[in-house]
Amino acid sequence: MAFLEMKHVSKYFGSVAANVDVNLSVEKGEIHALLGENGAGKSTLMNILYGMYAHSEGEIWLNGQPVRIKDPKDAIAKGIGMVHQHFMLIPALSVIENVVLGLKENKAVLDLKAAAREFSQMAERFGMELDPWAKVETLSVGAQQRVEILKALYRKASLLILDEPTAVLTPQEVKGLFHMLRQLTAEGLTIIFITHKLNEIMEVCDRCTILRLGRVVRTTAISDIQDKQELAALMVGSQVELLTQKPPAHPGDEVLRVEDLSYVDKRGIRALDQMSFSLRGGEILGVCGVDGNGQSELVRCITGLLKPASGSVRVCGADCTGADPRMILGQGVSHIPEDRHKMGMIREMTVNENLILMSYRTPECQKRGFLKWKDIRAHSQALCEQYNIKTPSVLERSGNLSGGNQQKMVVGRELDRRPRLLIAMHPDRGLDIGATKYIQRQIVAASQAGAGVLLVSTELDEILELSDRILVVFEGRMMGILDRSEATAERLGLMMAGARQSAG
Amino acid sequence: MLDWITNFLSSDIMTATPLLITALGAVYSERAGILNIGNEGLMLTGAFFGATVSWITGSAFVGAVAAMAAAMVLNLILAFFVITVKANQVVAGLAINTLASGLTVTLNRLIFGVSTTVPKIDVFDKVAIPGLCKIPVIGEAFFNQSLVVYLTYLLVPVLAFVLKRTNIGLKIRSVGEHPQACDTVGISVTGVRYGTMLFAGALAGLGGAFTSMGQLSFFVEDMVSGRGYMALAAVVFGNYTPVGVMGACLMFGAASALQYRLQTTATWIPYQFWIMLPYVITIIALCCYRKKSNRPACHGQAYAKM
C-alpha cells in the first residue's frame, strides 16, 4: 500500500486545465521526483496536496485513508510539510520565531527559549549549525532553506515536499542538501522533489513521475531509466538535442574591456569590487555565480543603467564609463535583460511596438517624427518568421504571448541590430527545453557572426556548454577566469562558493 | 519657575494622551499591515459619541464605552473595504474621515441644535493618587490625572510585551511582514487583520472621547483637527513600537505645551509661527530619523490568497 496516493486529481482555473486526471503514488521512505517543464502542473499538484488550492476532482489517500485537505493547517496536522520555491520565511523575524509561528501548541506567552533548545537539538541531529536567534534576513540562501526544512520537521512532518530546492544553491550546497535528504529518508521520512533538472533526479531520486501539460506521462523507477536523454524525451514528448553544438571560437578584435570596475549600492555595500576582464569579438564569456553576487550590477554598469563608483568600461575602444544607455547601445551593444517583464518588453504594448523599442528613431522606422507603420509592420512580420515568434498577429498584445515567445521576441529584436557586443543575462530563464535550446543556438550563431557575447547565467550546464571562457563571481568579486577546457562543475562550484583560483 | 515646569508637564501629558491612546491602537493595525488614514474620523466619532452619550446617561464611563463601540463599528466598515474588498487603503481611509466629519456634524445639530450654550456633561474626573501626588513639581503633573491617563500609560508596557513576546503578537507582526508565509502555516491573515482593526478602532474611539471629555467638556464640530494624523505620524516616528510611540507623543505634547506658553510670552513673533512649532518639530524629527525601520514589509497592501 502506498503512503500517499492522489487518484484522478484534476484542477481547473476557469476553463484552463492545470492538472487532468493525475494519479500519483508515493511509497514510504522514498525520494519521489516530480518532473516536468514549466507549466506542466507540478507546483499546482503539490499546492493541492498542501491545501493551498482546492482540487476540482479526485481523491487524496494518505496511509490508506481518504483525506480531505482544505487548508495548509489541515496539511500540517496530517504530517505534510512543504518548502516553497520562494521561501515562506519572514526576513525581519528570528529563526526561532519563524519556526514556531502559527503552531497550535503555542501558549499565549511564547516560551522561545525552550523552543530554541529543541530546535538546536534537532538541527544538530542533522548535522546543521543554525543560530536560532539570528534574524532570517542575515542568513545565506542555503541556510534559509535549512530553516525551512527544519521548520517542517519541527511540525512533525512525515512527508516533505520540496519545490525546486536546488535553484538557488551552489553545487556544493546541493550536495549537502542531497546528503540531508538521504538522512531524512533513512529516518523514515518520505520526500517529494519537484524539479526540471535531469541530473538531480538521476543522482538522488528513487522513483519519478513525469508530468506534461498537466497529465501524468509515466511513473517509473530511476533504475529503469537509461540516461538523461530518455527522461528529457519523456518530459518534452519528443526527442530533444540536449547539447547545443558550439564550434570553437575565432576571437577577433576586443569589443569590451572592463577595468577595476566597482559599484557601491545604496546600502553602502560594494556590490562590485575591482572587476577587470576583456572580451573579444566571436567569443562567448560566461559569467557564473549564485544569483545576487554582483551579476546584475556588472551588467547594469556596462549598459549604463548604473553609474560605477570607480573603474572604466570600454566598448569597441570607446570609453563608455558612466555614459547614458543610448550612447552605449549606439556602440553596437545589444542587451537581453535579466527580467523580460521588468526590463525587456512592455507587456501592454503590441509585438509590433515592442520590436521597434530600440530602433524607432532610425530612418527605417520614422520620418520627421512620424512612424512608418507600414514598413515597421512588414519588418516585424519578417522578424517573427525569422525568430520563430508564434503570435496570431504582430498587433497582438505582447503580454498575451507565452513566456518562450516573449523571450524570442526580445532576443529577435536585440539580434536584429547585428550587435558587436551582446550582453545576455539569464536568456532562457523559465523557458521550456525547446525554447531554451532555440535561444542558445541563436546566441551561438551571433557569436559565429562575430559578436562578442557576455553570457550571465546561474545554470552551470548552460555556462559549460556555451562558453569559451568562464568568469566566476562571488560577492561582487572576480574569483578568476577559466578556459573552457580547464573548467569542471566541481571547480566552478568551489569558486562560486568563494574559493579563489589562479586565472588560467 | 517650579510652577511653570509643573504646568508645562501637566499640559504635555494632557495633550499627549489622546494621541497616545489612538497611536497605541494604530501600532497594532499598522504592524498587521494596514495603513489607517481613517484614524482622524475614528477619533472624531469617538469624541462625538463619548460626549453625547455621557450627556444622555450622565455617566462618563458609559460615554467612553459608547465612543469605543462607535469607532469600532466605523473601523469595521473600513476593515471590510480594505481587507475583504481590497480597496485602496488611502482612499477608503479618507472616505471614512469624510463620513465621520459629516455624520458627527449632522447628528450634533440634530441633537443639540445650533445653540450657543454648552450642555453640561459628565467628564473624566481627575483622581489624585494619595502620596504620589504630593511629590514636588512632578506629583501634580503625573499623579493628579484622570483614570484614562493612568490606564493609557499602563497600557504601554503591556502592549509592548504582547507584541514582542506572545503568540498573538508574533502573528500580528508576521501578518504585516509576509502574509503569504502566514497562510502556509495556517494563520488566518484576514482574521488577524480584522482583530487588530477592531482593537485600533476601540482605542481611537477612546482617544477621541478624551478630547471631548478630558481636555474639553463638550463636543465641537471637527474638534479633532488633525490629531488622528498626528497619531499616525507618531506611529512612524515611534518606529511602530508602543514605547517609541509614547516617546513620540510626549514630544508632540511638549512641543504644543511650549507653543502655548511662547504664544503668550514671546509676543514679538506672530503667534501663527508658534502654532506651527509642533508640526515643524515633527517634520524635522521625521527627516532626521535614520534608524532601521520596523515598518512592515507588506504595509498598505491587501492580501489575496492564491
Image (spheres, helix red, strand yellow):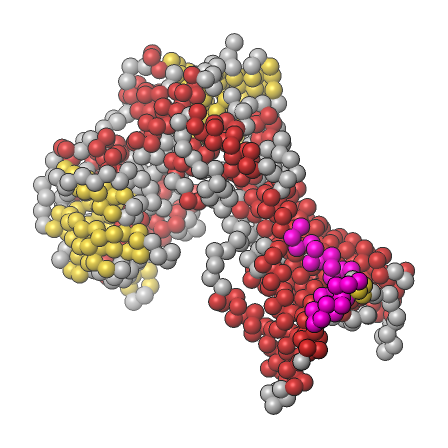
Q: Is residue B154 magenta?
A: yes
In the displayed structure, A479 sits above or below A76; it is below
In the rendered image, is residue B106 in sight? Answer: no
Name the residue rendered at 50%, 22% in the picture.
A159
Q: Residue A257: x and y, percent?
A: 16, 53
Q: Main secondary structure of the magenta part?
A: helix
Q: Nearer the viewer, residue B290 or B76?
A: B290
Q: Residue A88: x and y, percent?
A: 49, 38
Q: Nearer the viewer, residue A362 or A111?
A: A111
Q: Nearer the viewer, residue A406 or B159?
A: B159
In the displayed structure, A182 sits above or below B252; it is above
Q: Residue B60: x and y, percent?
A: 84, 61
Name the residue rendered at 62%, 23% in the picture.
A68
Q: Which segment is the magenta one?
A: B130-158
Q: Nearer the viewer, residue B117 or B95?
A: B117
State which quarter of the image contains the C terminus of chain A: top left
Q: Residue A93: x and y, percent?
A: 51, 44
Name the residue rendered at 67%, 80% in the picture.
B1
Name the residue rendered at 13%, 33% in the picture.
A485
In the displayed structure, A211 sits above or below A493; it is above
In the rendered image, is residue B207 in sight? Answer: yes
Q: Is residue B219 magenta?
A: no
Quadrant of the image occupied by residue A309 = bottom left
Is residue A184 found left or right of B139 in the rendered image? Answer: left
Is residue B43 found left or right of A208 in the rendered image? Answer: right
Q: Which residue occupies the extreme top position in the image?
A: A1
Q: How many marks?
A: 0
In the displayed structure, A72 sits above or below B277; it is above
Quadrant of the image occupied by residue B58 = bottom right
Q: Which residue occupies the extreme right position in the image?
A: B57
